[in-house]
Amino acid sequence: MPEAAERDVVGQVLRLVWGGLSDCATASSPREMALFLNYTQKKFGQDKRDTLTRFCRECDVRFACNGGCPKDRFATSPYGEPGQHHLCPGYQDFFHHVREPMEAMMMLLRQGRAPSELMSSYALDDSARGGCSRFAGMGPLTCGNAA
């Protein structure tokens, strides 16, 4: 199960942390812990989804972060809305960068094959371009015309 920050709605699952129960590892006192056990917990969970900025709701990688933890939403969205996660640009860059290899690994898994097969494919592509191959065995990095 993803961490609370990456779930769409939180408040259904509690975990034991130092000092009590928590949904996002922030409960530190008996009073705070009690909040997680009643209506407030469910409201917090629903508000996590319902307070997303328009930019976040329209994001093509929202499935991966779901706006992150609300305590980290202190930036302004590109549409000028307060409440954007401050790491959003980095999350978008990362999830766009890994989308193609993740989809390829998913396809390999569905075919009953090992996702690690992707590494040899990348190594062949790299060497065909004369670039560095990080996946060609366990030996040293090999780069194009290096001696």
Image: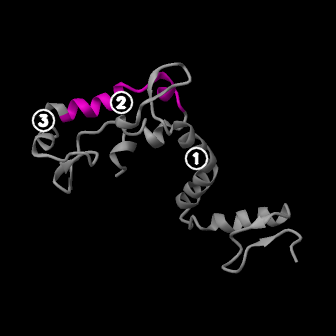
In the image, 90: left or right of 57? right
Q: Is residue 58 above or below residue 2?
A: above
As measured in the structure, the alpha-carbon distance from the residue carrying label 1 to the one carrying label 3 is 36 Å
The amino acid sitting under disc 2 is Arg
Position of 136 compared to 33: left or right?
right
Q: For marks 2 and 3, give the CA distance.
A: 18 Å
Q: Does the CB distance between marks 1 and 2 fall below 8 Å?
A: no
Q: Position of residue 104 (x, y in %)?
A: 62, 55
Assess whether residue 57 is covered by the magenta stretch.
Answer: yes
The mark found on residue 49 in the picture is 2
> 117 above or below 71?
below
Disc number at residue 38? Answer: 3
**Start-end of magenta stretch:** 41-59
Instruction: Tell me, yes or no, whether the highlighted magenta stretch contains residue 27.
Output: no
**Dot 1 and dot 3 residues touching (CB under 8 Å):** no
Q: Please, what is the dominant secondary structure of the magenta stretch?
A: helix
